[in-house]
Image (cartoon, grey):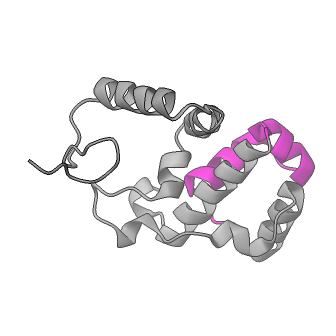
Amino acid sequence: MARSNIRPVDALVGQNIRILRLQRGLSQSALGERMGVTFQQVQKYERGANRVGAGRLSQIAQALDVPLTNLFDGRPAADRSDTELSVGALLAHPHSLRLLQAFDRIADPKRRMAILHLIESVGGPSTRRQRSGSGRRRAR
């Protein structure tokens, strides 16, 4: 199936499969083994290139030990502008979940802000307006 023919719901389900798999520390091969399919098939499901039938959805939910409805969490990216990514889409990027988990382990608020500013500076200019550390504008 060509990328342009991927339906938003298929992309959403694939994205959620990837996020849930990564949260559980499973490789595509390990998930495939639990389901009785190859890692290539898992890749196709995660990309939304292959649609996932009802029986397979149930099998995936069981392999990931989540309710079936978790595979449909969030709204499809097609409902959003090109510049606005859903949380799920952001977490689907490689290493995003690890970065978020590591950031969550930082107890010191000043260090958290320093890391946040570092990442924002490395990531390039933001389309959002810069704010003070508290999230409120400072009075002049």
Q: Position of residue 112 (x, y in %)?
A: 49, 32
Residue 55 image-quadrant placement: bottom right
- 43 is higher (above) or lower (below) than 5: above
Residue 40 image-quadrant placement: top right
As rendered, which of 52 and 74 lies closer to the eye? 74
Which residue sits at x=58%, y=55%?
15
Asked if residue 46 lies in the magenta stretch, the reply is yes
Q: Position of residue 24 (x, y in %)?
A: 80, 45
- 9 is higher (above) or lower (below) than 96: below
- 139 is higher (above) or lower (below) than 26: below
Residue situated furthest front in the rendering: 140
Total labels: the figure holds 0
Task: Report whether residue 50 is seen.
Answer: no
Q: Position of residue 133 (x, y in %)?
A: 33, 41
Q: Is residue 131 left or right of residue 105?
A: left
Q: Position of residue 56 (x, y in %)?
A: 80, 66
Which residue sits at x=33%, y=32%?
120
Asked if residue 98 lies in the magenta stretch, the reply is no
As rendered, which of 47 and 71 lies closer to the eye? 71
Span colored in magenta: 25-51
